[in-house]
Each structure stands twice: as C-alpha cells, then as structure tokens.
Amino acid sequence: MGKNKKNKRGVMYSTNPDFEYEYEDNKMETIANNQQNLKVCIDKHRAGNVVVIIKDFIGTTDDLKCLGKMLKTKCGVGGSAKNGEIIIQGRVRDKVMEILEKEGYNYKRVGG
C-alpha cells in the first residue's frame, strides 16, 4: 500500500483485475489563460432557472474552482465548479465573457 487510502477517488471494490485507482495527486497541469479554449453557453437548469456554463477548462480542479469563484464574485451570483465545468447562476453570459476577456482567456460563445 504505497499510497494513502484517503487519496482514492470513491471506488470501494472492483471485479476488474486490471483496475487501477485514480489518486488525487495525479492532476492535469493547468495551461495558460491565452491557450484555453473555453465554451460559454446559456442553459436552463433545474426548476427552469437560467445558468451560464463554461466548458472545456484544461487544468487542475483547484484552478477550475478558483476561476469559478472569481466569476461568481465579480458577477455577484452563485454557482459551482466541478467535473471540468463552471456553472454560474443567472443570465450573466455577457458579463462572464467580459471578465474572461479581461483575464486573457480564449472563449467561444455557444448557442443562442
């Protein structure tokens, strides 16, 4: 047991003999802001609420959460950052795109 059990990602048992655990310290390196190609789309979420979704972030979970927190703070709304996506509550896509542009991110508006 070379790795600490606490770093394992939610798998308790597997019948696959070739299964390898994913450890938290095996993170993808975050690329520079100007090399990111983010997709910014608007969508109806649960209960019909409108949200802005930022997809295709390449980097660590910590950097994703940091960008999400900055966007939520500057827009004055709630949201979440997980699974490579940032969800910002409300119809604030134009404001999100302005912030991404000021921070030097490449982005593309997707959808109507």
Image (tube, rainbow, N blue to C red):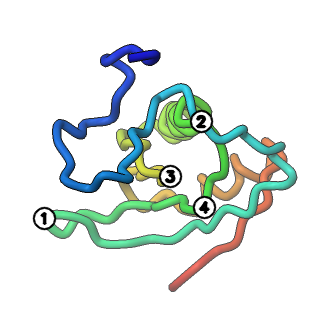
Q: Earlier in the sequence, mark 1 or mark 4?
A: 1
From the viewer's side, name the closer residue of 39 and 15.
15
Question: Disc 4 marks which amino acid?
Answer: Asp
Q: For numbered disc 4, what is the local secondary structure? A: loop
Alpha carbon distance from label 1 to label 4 = 25 Å
Is the residue under label 2 in contact with that under label 3 (CB below 8 Å)? no
* Quarter of the N terminus within the rendering: top left
What is the crowding at mark 1: few (fewer than 14 residues within 10 Å), some, or many (at least 20)? few
Question: Disc 3 marks which amino acid?
Answer: Gly
Check the image and report above or below for 19 versus 63. below
Q: Earlier in the sequence, mark 2 or mark 4?
A: 2
Q: Residue under circle 1? A: 47
Is the residue under label 4 in contact with that under label 3 (CB below 8 Å)? yes
**Residue at left 62%, top 68%?**
39
- Residue that sits furthest to the left in the current view: 47
Question: Disc 2 marks which amino acid?
Answer: Lys
What is the crowding at mark 4: few (fewer than 14 residues within 10 Å), some, or many (at least 20)? some
Alpha carbon distance from label 2 to label 4 = 16 Å
**Tag nearer the camera, 2 or 1:** 2
Q: Residue under circle 2? A: 27
Q: Which mark is residue 94?
A: none
